[in-house]
Image (cartoon, rainbow, N blue to C red):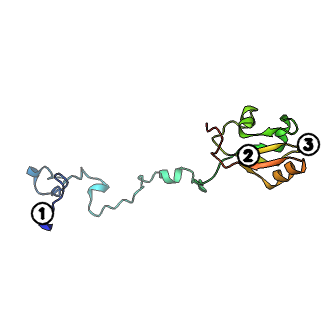
């Protein structure tokens, strides 16, 4: 292929519209501007968004504020006070939390938070813990295991 053989795709180029060159051209008399009015006159420059003096839609709608963080991780939250449904010394897995209704789905990672008190030792497996929750679980004689999200858990 040579430079002199390059051509635009068929149908992609059109001749420009020549207005005001007689009625035989189909674009005579009013030259595609319609009859009278502001937009028929020479020098007509109406800025984008102008609505003829009516309050423009851009001013009628409330302004958006802030932003949405697309990298945010949403957790299923469980407080230590909710773990009293388990017997002392039992193992608390993600599946057991789902079975007991403490989390609705395992599609989100599970995080244990520190609200309330824990009076029994439990072996807890979850995806994440707050520092205060770790301290409360270990103070009650329990142990924690951090499970990476997506491994071993049933994805719903």
Residue 5 is situated, as x and y percent measured from the top left of the image, at 12, 63
Closer to the chain start, of discs 3 and 1, is: 1
Of the two numbered discs 3 and 1 in the rendering, the one whose residue sits closer to the viewer? 3
Residue occupying image coordinates x 62% and y 53% = 72
Q: Nearer the viewer, residue 128 or 69?
A: 128
Residue occupying image coordinates x 63% and y 41% = 107
How many numbered marks does the figure carry? 3
Residue 101 is situated, as x and y percent measured from the top left of the image, at 74, 33
Task: Give the residue at mark 1.
Answer: 5
Residue 69 is situated, as x and y percent measured from the top left of the image, at 60, 55
Q: Nearer the viewer, residue 156 or 30?
A: 156
User: The C terminus is located in which quarter?
Assistant: top right
Task: Give the residue at mark 2.
Answer: 126
Disc 1 on helix, strand or loop?
helix
Badge 1 crowding class, 10 Å Cα cut-off, few under 14, some 14 to 19, many 20 or more, is few
Disc 3 on helix, strand or loop?
loop
58 vs 87, left or right, is left
30 vs 70, left or right, is left
Distance from label 1 to label 2 (Cα)? 66 Å
Disc 2 on helix, strand or loop?
strand
Residue 106 is situated, as x and y percent measured from the top left of the image, at 66, 39
120 vs 27, left or right, is right
Residue occupying image coordinates x 82% and y 39% = 83
Of the two numbered discs 1 and 2 in the rendering, the one whose residue sits closer to the viewer? 2
Distance from label 3 to label 1 (Cα)? 85 Å
Distance from label 2 to label 3 (Cα)? 19 Å
Closer to the chain start, of discs 1 and 2, is: 1
Q: Quadrant of residue 84?
A: top right
Q: Nearer the viewer, residue 133 or 139?
A: 139
Vertical order, 58 against 97 (above or below): below
Badge 3 crowding class, 10 Å Cα cut-off, few under 14, some 14 to 19, many 20 or more, is some
Task: Give the residue at mark 3.
Answer: 119
């Amino acid at each position: 292929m040579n430079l002199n053989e390059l051509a635009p795709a068929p149908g992609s180029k059109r001749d420009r519209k020549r207005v005001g060159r007689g009625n035989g051209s189909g674009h005579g008399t009013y030259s595609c501007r319609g009859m009278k009015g502001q937009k028929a006159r020479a020098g007509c420059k109406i800025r984008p968004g102008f609505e003829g003096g009516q309050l423009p839609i851009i001013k009628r709608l409330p302004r958006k504020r802030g932003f949405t963080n697309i990298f945010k991780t949403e957790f299923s939250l469980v407080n230590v006070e909710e773990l009293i449904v388990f017997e002392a010394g039992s193992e608390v897995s993600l599946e057991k939390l789902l079975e007991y209704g403490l989390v609705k789905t395992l599609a989100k990672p599970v995080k244990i938070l520190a609200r309330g008190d824990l009076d029994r030792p439990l072996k807890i497996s979850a995806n994440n813990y707050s520092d205060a929750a770790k301290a409360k679980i270990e103070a009650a004689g329990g142990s924690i295991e951090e499970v990476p999200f997506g491994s071993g858990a049933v994805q719903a």
